[in-house]
Image (cartoon, rainbow, N blue to C red):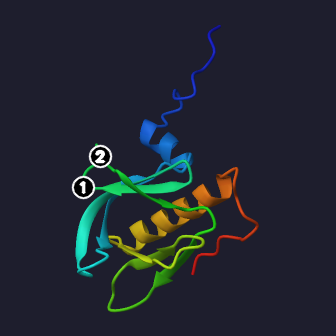
Amino acid sequence: MAGTSATSNGATEKRLEEAKGAKKGFLSKKTHFTRRWKQAWFQIKDSKLYYGGNEKNPVKSISLIGAEIEGLEHDGGFDWTIRPQGSKRTFFLRAGSAEDQQQWMVAICEAQMSSREHTSNACVLQ
């Protein structure tokens, strides 16, 4: 009798990636100098949040290890901030819905917690 493969239970590759914290997709990011919102591709991988113009070229990254994540409540937007540990810069991000915002924030916390370099700070979502 043959063994059952890990994907024979109907799990898709996308769900398997998300279970590992490999969340990816488009978000809006407030630009550093002009402070305008610009859409970019984001992907969590190896305790970093990579981003760039498209999924084939996410060349910039934000370290998630020890980063402070905070949800923002204003004007019905689905915004949150990430402040990397030891950095004065704060990254402002925006999702298209409250559900998407929550999924991203949870995935970021899971990436922080699963890192070998995990700090003792608990990841708290507000």
- Write down the residue under mark 2: 57
**Where's residue 56, x and y in %?**
28, 43
Q: Secondary structure at mark 2?
A: loop
- Tell me whether the residue at label 1 lies in contact with that at label 2, contact meaning CB atoms closer than 8 angstroms: yes
**Amino acid of disc 2:** Asn
User: Would you say 108 lies left or right of 91 here?
Assistant: right
Q: Label for residue 108?
A: none
Q: Is residue 71 above or below residue 19?
A: below
Residue at image position (32%, 76%) is: 32
Q: Label for residue 53?
A: 1
**Amino acid of disc 1:** Gly
User: Would you say 34 lies left or right of 108 here?
Assistant: left
Give the quarter of the image for residue 35. bottom left
Give the quarter of the image for residue 112. bottom right
Q: Residue furthest right?
A: 120
Q: Quadrant of the N terminus?
A: top right
Q: Residues within 10 Å of mark 1 (few under 14, many from 20)?
A: some
Q: Secondary structure at mark 1?
A: loop
Q: Is residue 32 above or below residue 75?
A: above
Residue at image position (36%, 57%) is: 51
Q: Residues within 10 Å of mark 2 (few under 14, many from 20)?
A: few
Q: Residue furthest top?
A: 1
**Where's residue 57, x and y in %?**
29, 46
